[in-house]
Image (cartoon, grey):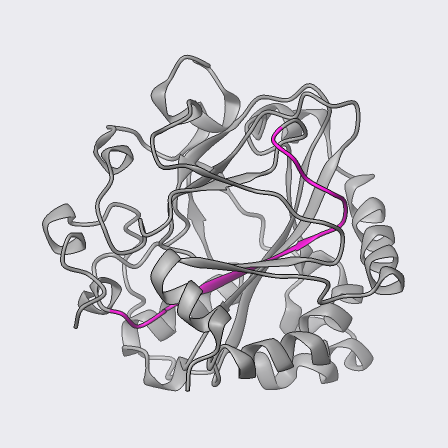
């Protein structure tokens, strides 16, 4: 029998798991995040003004403790998302007096027919380090938009540098839309999100940073199409350039010191090396999307 959270994830495209991590673990994650955020340049913040900043955790091996944490493993079991691998992770921190995050989804695999089925090709685990409300830039989502088209899907836009820099705050992708739901959480809560789900965040009008840890996993990896597996492997290896943002090929998770690497080696994506990776495509076929979730 499906768990309540699994049913919500399928129907809504997300679920909220309360108090998955205790205060001591949240404080530890917060210390790692603070250390990484010390190295964020002003140029980076200006390029990612809408997000706040995006820091790839591949450069910080301490995060192995959370990627391989037993609480996350138990959550994957509860959600019946076994066979998962880790592909990427980021620290996302919206500073005080920062603008909204633009509406988007995080899924890149719309060229493959699997993306239009009820299979969940990727989930995003958002681990919150502080309370969130609309006033400090909490997440907002369009429930069901992982399977059904919404007017946001029809807004012509390229999810790249212009939207990230907030060159036009009047753009419709920064605005509120009918059907949006604010996701208010407490430290230690985790939002599990199908990465096909439309989401954004309110402006942070508070005087505090709003920071979270975002981890991407691909369930049932061995059963995914070969091209999709190859793309996931390339993302894991930081062989990517998209969203108008070049990603430096710095430290790889697979190169972490043995003590940290051993904790999560079982989550590394492995596949044949001679398969062409699936093309990046962040734009779903809206006719196909309307029928998604029923095959």
Which residue is drawn at the image coordinates 28% and 64% (left, top)?
A: 278
Residue 38 in the image: x percent, y percent? Answer: 83, 39
- Residue in front for this viewpoint, 29 or 178: 178
Confirm whether residue 120 shows in the render: yes
Q: Is residue 210 left or right of residue 197?
A: right
Which residue is drawn at the image coordinates 36% and 69% (left, top)?
A: 120
User: Relative to 8, does residue 243 appear above or below in the rendering?
Assistant: above
Which residue is drawn at the image coordinates 71% and 57% (left, top)?
A: 59
Q: Main secondary structure of the magenta part?
A: loop
Residue 228 in the image: x percent, y percent? Answer: 32, 70
Q: Is residue 131 found inside the magenta-colored segment of the image?
A: yes
- Residue in front for this viewpoint, 166 or 171: 171
Q: Is residue 16 left or right of residue 222?
A: right
Q: Is residue 69 left or right of residue 202?
A: right
The quarter of the image holding the C terminus is bottom left
Confirm whether residue 193 shows in the render: no
Residue 264 in the image: x percent, y percent? Answer: 67, 80
User: Relative to 62, does residue 2 appear above or below in the rendering?
Assistant: below
Q: How many marks?
A: 0
Q: Which residues are magenta?
A: 118-134
User: Relative to 173, does residue 259 appear above or below in the rendering?
Assistant: below
Residue 97 in the image: x percent, y percent? Answer: 69, 19
């Amino acid at each position: 029998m499906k768990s309540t959270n699994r049913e919500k994830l399928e129907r809504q495209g997300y679920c909220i798991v309360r108090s998955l991590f205790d205060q001591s673990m949240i404080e530890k994650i917060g210390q790692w995040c603070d250390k990484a955020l010390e190295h964020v340049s002003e140029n980076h913040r200006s390029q990612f003004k809408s997000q706040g900043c995006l820091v790839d955790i591949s450069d910080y091996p301490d995060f192995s403790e959370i990627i391989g944490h037993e609480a996350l493993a138990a959550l994957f079991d509860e959600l019946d998302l076994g066979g998962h691998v880790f592909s990427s992770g980021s620290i996302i921190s919206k500073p005080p007096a920062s603008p909204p995050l633009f509406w988007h989804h995080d899924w890149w695999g719309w060229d493959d027919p699997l993306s239009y089925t009820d299979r969940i090709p990727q989930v995003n685990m958002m681990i919150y380090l502080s309370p969130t409300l609309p006033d400090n830039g909490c997440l907002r989502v369009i429930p069901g938009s992982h399977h059904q088209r919404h007017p946001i899907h029809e807004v012509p836009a390229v999810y790249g540098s212009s939207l990230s820099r907030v060159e036009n705050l009047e753009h419709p992708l920064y605005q509120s839309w009918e059907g949006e739901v604010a996701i208010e959480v407490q430290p230690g809560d985790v939002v599990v999100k199908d990465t096909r789900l439309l989401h954004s965040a309110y402006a942070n009008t508070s005087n505090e940073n709003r920071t979270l840890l975002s981890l991407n996993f691909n369930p049932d990896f061995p059963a995914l199409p070969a091209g999709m597996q190859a793309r996931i492997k390339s993302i894991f290896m930081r062989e990517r350039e998209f969203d108008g943002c070049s990603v430096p090929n710095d430290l790889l998770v697979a190169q972490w010191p043995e003590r940290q690497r051993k904790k999560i080696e079982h989550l590394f994506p492995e596949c044949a090396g001679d398969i062409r990776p699936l093309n990046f495509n962040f734009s779903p076929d809206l006719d196909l999307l309307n029928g998604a979730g029923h095959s």
